Image (cartoon, rainbow, N blue to C red):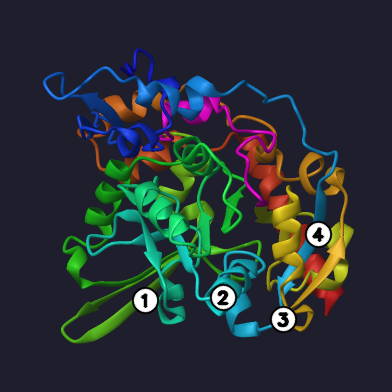
Amino acid sequence: MITITEKVNCCGCFSCYNICPTQSISMIPDDEGFLYPTIDLNKCINCNLCEKHCPILQSKNNIQQKKEEGQIIYGCRNSINNELYKSSSGGMFSLFAKKIFEDQGIVIGAKFNEKWNVVHTAIDDIKDLQYLIGSKYVQSEIGFIYKKTKELLKNNCKVLFIGTPCQVSGLHSFLSKEYNNLITIDFVCHGVPSPLVWQQYLKEIIPDNSNIKSINFRDKHTGWPQYCFSYSYISNNQEYKYYIPTRRNPFMRGFLHNLYLRPSCHKCKFKGFTSKSDITMSDFWGVWKNYPKWNDQKGASCIAINTKKGLDFFNSLNDKDFSKVDITFKQAYIDYNHSALHTTPYNPKRNEFFRKFQQEPFSTLSLRLSKDPILTQIKIAISDILNVLRQINHY
């Protein structure tokens, strides 16, 4: 029987929830809004499958281990401008998904539901791909999607599953065997914010979320990497759209300052490419130094190919649909993208945030606790100036 004595030891992956044969496990939110397993002792048969399939209990902490050997890493970006613009970085997920659809397969990933919470879902129609595109900085609810994945795989359906490293690891722990018709993709993860905090922010900006039409955490309206948070809503039959620079958006600031990440994110067991994913996606930060040709605000991705199955899948893409360039492990993850290898630091102000979360307006609290020191503000200002100069030089 799985017992959570320390919250850092549960990543909320839902593997235990999916594997329980008597459905005696419920995922219940705590005071911070994160879901944790709770056991119904009247239903539990003490089979211990929940413990055997928990990726954290079964994993070894490989945070310091870098999967450099055998990895192939490319800088990539989609050649279709519309798909590139709608993406968070280089638009490669669209190409991966379309390839699966060509093979009559299923794509599983995160989308907003009708209440603008983030959930994992399965799609079989390219028309629905728009709902899975783009970063969503809220922990998604897996539900029984692992069970659904297994059913599809056993029926010889090709499946592409994309999620955080802990979710991909949770899927592999649940399946307990390799499937040739499964492609798993994770991404370099900073950490997952609380769904409760997210809903509180939404209530502040749009009291009735049924009026929301769109949300984009990384809108390229202001370019890449200086992306912005955008949202639109309907009022009196008229659509209103707002663009908020990331550094001035209360939710994004609190997220990037680690005020309300899941506790396990601060002791993540899945750094260093240990999730067993076939492919890892991330931003191609440092493109201005390593490949200036793409330094044009459109975005670019790092694609790390971790397995032979991942390589075969990548090679099956149409070369005309994207561009690629070889990059090194150092260029991708040591010089930039440190979250691939290192756990997100704990912010000492996190406790204060949750103590005052229900007492003080969210935006006021988040902006106050995420205020940068003067030296950091100066560094950011200099970085912004340099980015502008790079763009001038590019054009």
Q: Is 263 colored magenta in this rendering?
A: yes
* Separation of marks 3 and 4 at Cα, in angstroms: 15 Å
Amino acid type, residue under disc 3 in the picture:
Asp
Q: Amino acid at mark 2?
A: Asp
The amino acid sitting under disc 1 is Lys
Which mark lies nearer to you, 2 or 4? Answer: 2
Residue projecting furthest to the left:
42
Residue at 44 percent of width and 29 percent of height: 53
| Residue 41 rendering spot, x and y as whole percentages | 15, 18
Q: Which residue is mark 4?
A: 74
Q: Quadrant of the C terminus?
A: bottom right
Where does residue 167 sit, x and y in percent of width and height? 48, 42
**Amino acid type for the residue under numbered disc 4:** Tyr
CA distance for labels 2 and 4: 24 Å
Residue 275 drawn above or below residue 390: above
Q: Which residue is mark 3?
A: 321
Question: Mark 1 — residue?
Answer: 241
Q: SS of the residue at dot 4? A: strand
The kind of secondary structure element at disc 1 is strand
Q: Position of residue 264 (x, y in %)?
A: 46, 27
Q: Is residue 346 visible?
A: no
Alpha-carbon neighbours of circle 1 within 10 Å: few (<14), some, or many (≥20)?
A: few
Residue occupying the point 18% across, 60% down: 207
**Tag 3: Cα neighbours inside 10 Å, few (<14), some, or many (≥20)?**
few
Q: Name the mark nearer the viewer: 2 or 1.
A: 2
Which of the two marks, 1 or 4, is nearer to us in this view? 4
Examine the residues drawn in magenta and state their main secondary structure: loop
Q: Which mark is residue 103?
A: 2
Q: Give SS at disc 2.
A: loop
Camera-nearest residue between 241 and 310 = 310
* Region rendered in magenta: 260-279
**Nearest to N terminus: mark 3 or mark 2:** 2
